[in-house]
Amino acid sequence: MSEADRAPTASAVPKPLSAAQKALRKLGLSRDIDLALHLPLRYEDETRITPLKACREGQLAQIEGVVTRCEVQLRPRRQLLVTVDDGTDTCQLRFFTFYPAYQKTLAEGERVRVRGEVRGGFLGWTMVHPTFGRAGGELPEALTPVYPTSAQLPQAYLRKAVASGLRRADVSETLPAPLLDSLHAAVAQGQGPRMTLAQALRCLHQPSPDTALEALEDRSHPAWQRLKAEELLAQQLSQLTAKRERERLVAPSLRSEVGGLPEHLLARLPFALTTAQQRVSREITGDLARAVPMNRLLQGDVGSGKTVVAALAAAVAMGAGWQCALMAPTEILAAQHFAKLVQWIEPILLPTGRCVAWLTGSQKKKERQAMLALIASGQAALVVGTHAVIQAHVEFQRLGLAIIDEQHRFGVAQRLALRSKLRDGGEPHLLMMSATPIPRTLAMTYLADLDVSTIDELPPGRTPIMTKVLAEVRRPEVIERIRTQLQEGRQVYWVCPLIEESEALDLSNATATHAELSTALNPPGAPTVAVGLLHSRMGSADKQAVMTEFVQGRMGVLVSTTVIEVGVDVPNASLMVIEHAERFGLSQLHQLRGRVGRGAAASACVLLYSPNESGRLSETARQRLKAMAETTDGFDIARRDLDIRGPGEFLGARQSGAALLRFADLSTDTHLLAWAREAARTMLEHHPQAAQRHIARWLGEKTDYFKA
């Protein structure tokens, strides 16, 4: 690590670290460059004094005057009241929380400098909880930055640490002259100030009073544009580097002979592949034939037929004499895959003497040992399971392909562990699947190291799903609708967000709803309706027993938490009720809705919502429910979800909780992204050392997030 990259107090770090130093580390501020890139949330203008007579209602102003009154008032509530006279008018300061030191600084006769929002009233100007200090000394020449911080880090301490880091950090240019020219064109369309990185950082940390504050705070200022472009460049460089490193690795070349397992599988399927399924299967087969590890994301809407494409990829690997592992995030989803794949694949494996193995954490020891032996010997050509598949003691004989379903639910370490299962060096091919379509701009940015295959059509026969948004007061109507569906021989899901009462959240729970529906749907003398209950605290055997009853049609209603969100396939289920729908994310609502509409019957999804005490929904919840009612297109849903949540949340566990972009905004900075993608290729090709310096400056150790 260079001198410029050391922590700001590296030469004298005490043992143990102080609370403030620990807080700095917790914020990720361990290097000088980290501090230099810790940018303000907003600014306070302490560069000028405003006479009270010139103040306007609601203005954030700094005044200077003499304290003429300072007293504690006990009624109607305890507060400190201070009157300040600046010679043009007076202003009353109110503090409802205060300390003895306040009264010392604000004692009568003291000259003070006060900053706060000026409000008018019957008694003249007032400020509530303003900042204050003794007057004197020169006014600052720059706006005062307000930084993101934590309770252990006072602004004053953080300002000093940032200023110190900024002075020491190496912010010299990493970009060669031609890229600086193209960056200037991208940032300012050839106009405006041409800023170096050092100038941009100084401008953002210490802007002069005449700097356009609005441009700073909405991040449209040229200094912000420079920072955003550099950040996007670092991110593109990192992913492109990871992709090129992966292309130097070796993977088994998986080619299935003509008339092999893939053809046998296609012949057994009771349906024909859609054009989109055929296209993505060709893309995957082409990757598997190469001796370079495939790193492909297969995305498609709910019900678009990703599982059969994965089965065909598995058939290619198995037909070439290698093993395939398929990992799902939950036992229920893994069990669904297992049942479907056994039905499709086991008959074509039988002549080869191989089988499909099942591996989860809840298995009995004897069954587990038998499965591990089948996997180690290579007799298990396909292994389906949960996180148990990547445990250290699971040994594959010849793992050629790893398939991860719902990839956003798996962290980086888990995916790296699965890829490390190939013996004798090299890596298995990796296919990730997602039923949450990722918008193109997001894929270009965060998934630049992946190849993306998209299934953009649904199989024929899928019935449209009607979505209704209803207030909780209409619950009795919904229960009556369920009764009608049951009389027609259909099945119903009812999804709840919690499984037990919470004092903090006034939410109905799955247990109470199960009891309510069991009573309402089973009046005396009527045929019995089986109402099942499924939640995450049940044992695996109990969960599987309930699901089997529902899948086989012996249960009319399934009350469940979100464990049924993905993968469950019951064509006879025609109604989905989601209780407290305002509590769910948009992607989650769309996934849940996709559990119905899988058969020939007309299907519906009812979103029951409970407004807050004022009878309203939050703006975010309102946008989600509106989107659900307006479209069933998963790609449109994904676009709206990105607008509502932002990219970090949208991508879930890919970044293991770390924000991948702090400054750039994909909704407004697409021109900078286009520049960064081209610049990254040029820089890696012609200026590799500068590229590595740039990555190290911006990402430090975070480059691991892009390796999986």
Image (tube, rainbow, N blue to C red):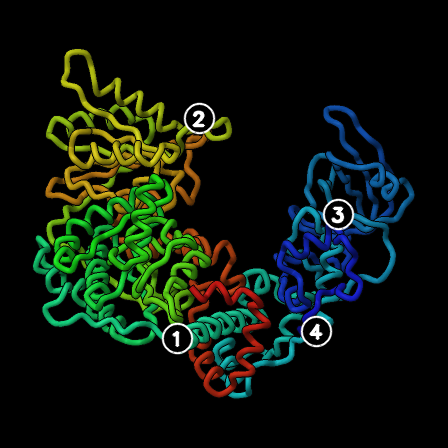
Whichever of labels 3 and 1 marks the residue nearer the N terminus, that label is 3
Q: Amino acid at mark 1?
A: Leu
Q: Is residue 637 visible?
A: no
Q: CA distance from mark 3 to mark 4?
A: 35 Å
Image quadrant occupied by the N terminus: bottom right
Provide residue 359's location: percent of width, then percent of height: 32, 48
Quadrant hosting residue 435 = bottom left
Whichever of labels 4 and 1 marks the residue nearer the N terminus, that label is 4
Whichever of labels 1 and 2 marks the residue nearer the N terminus, that label is 1
Between disc 4 and disc 1, the foreground one is: 1
Residue 568 horizontal side relative to residue 422, left or right: left
Q: CA distance from mark 4 to mark 1?
A: 34 Å
Q: Residues within 10 Å of mark 3 (few under 14, many from 20)?
A: few
Q: Residues within 10 Å of mark 4 (few under 14, many from 20)?
A: some
| Residue drawn 21% across the image and 21% down it | 521
Q: CA distance from mark 1 to mark 2?
A: 52 Å
| Residue drawn 77% across the image and 37% down it | 98
Q: Which numbered disc covers residue 249? A: 1
Seen in the picture, residue 603 relative to 486 is either above or below; the reply is below
Residue 432 horizontal side relative to residue 120, left or right: left
Residue 544 horizontal side relative to residue 194, left or right: left
Q: Amino acid at mark 2?
A: Glu
Identify the residue position indicated by label 4 in the image.
4
Provide residue 517's location: percent of width, then percent of height: 27, 23
* Tag 4 and tag 1, C-beta contact below 8 Å: no
Identify the residue position indicated by label 3 in the image.
131
| Residue drawn 17% across the image and 46% down it | 464
Q: Amino acid at mark 3?
A: Thr
Seen in the picture, residue 213 relative to 386 is either above or below; the reply is below
Which residue occupies the foreground of this view, 205 or 409?
A: 409
Whichever of labels 3 and 2 marks the residue nearer the N terminus, that label is 3
